[in-house]
Image: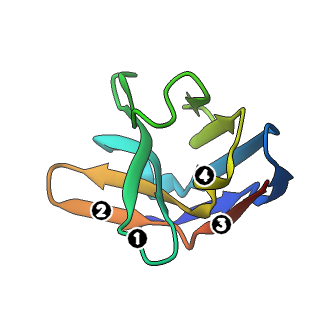
Amino acid sequence: QVQLVESGGGLVQAGGSLRLSCTASESARVFTSIGWYRQAPGEQRELVATISSSGNTNYADSVKGRFTISRDNAKNMVDLQMNSLNPDDTAVYYCNLKVGPFINYWGQGTQVTVSS
């Protein structure tokens, strides 16, 4: 069973930065992609950024140029550096790991709140 543990959420003023980290258990060595999704109150969960096993990255248009996803294979970690945050970025951020097209693992979520 894959376990994903997130850290790094919190409260920040608009224009500020936060860094989220997700550590995957040892059983997650084989995967298709790993990354971040977010869900704001009353909204559907949406993709933020992912990185494939080959290193290809994918970003939501709303975060391009502001967020950067990176992976540390040795530590089985994926980070999300978030800069120039604005109130629209307020959401619960979830780490996601995909194995093939149908298997998804999720972390417990970490709250990010951006005040105006």
Contact, CB < 8 Å: mark 2 with mark 1?
A: no
Q: Secondary structure at mark 3?
A: strand
Q: Nearer the viewer, mark 2 or mark 1?
A: 1
Q: Are marks 2 and 4 in contact (CB under 8 Å)?
A: no
Look at 76% across and 54% down and name the residue there.
Answer: 8
> On the rendered structure, is 7 left or right of 35?
right
Indicate the amino acid at tag 2.
Asn
State the colouring used for the structure image.
rainbow
Whichever of callouts 1 and 4 sits on the residue coming sooner in the sequence is 1
Q: CA distance from mark 4 to mark 3?
A: 13 Å
Query: Label 1 sits on what residue type?
Result: Glu
The residue nearer to you, when weighing 83 against 53, is 83
Instruction: Judge whether 53 appears above or below 14 on screen.
Output: above
Q: Which residue is mark 3?
A: 110
Q: Secondary structure at mark 2?
A: strand
Residue 93 percent location from the top left of the image: 56, 60
Mark 1–mark 3 Cα distance, whole angstroms, equals 16 Å
Which tag is nearer the camera, tag 1 or tag 3? 1
User: Dot 2, how many residues are within 10 Å of its Cα: few (below 14), some (14-19), or many (20+)?
Assistant: some
At 43% from the left and 66% from the top, the residue drawn is: 106
Query: Which residue corresponds to mark 1?
Result: 43
Q: Quick one: 15 or 36, which is closer to the camera? A: 15
- Indicate which disc residue 89 carries: 4
* Residue placed under numbered mark 2 in the picture: 104
| Residue 72 lies in quadrant | top right
Discs 4, 3 touching: Cβ within 8 Å: no
For residue 64, side relative to residue 6 (left or right): left
> Which label lies toward us, 2 or 3?
3
Q: CA distance from mark 1 to mark 4?
A: 12 Å
Residue drawn at x 35%, y 22% as measured from the top left: 56
Give the left or right position of residue 111, taking residue 34 as reference.
Answer: right
Question: Which of these two is toward me, 32 or 39?
Answer: 39
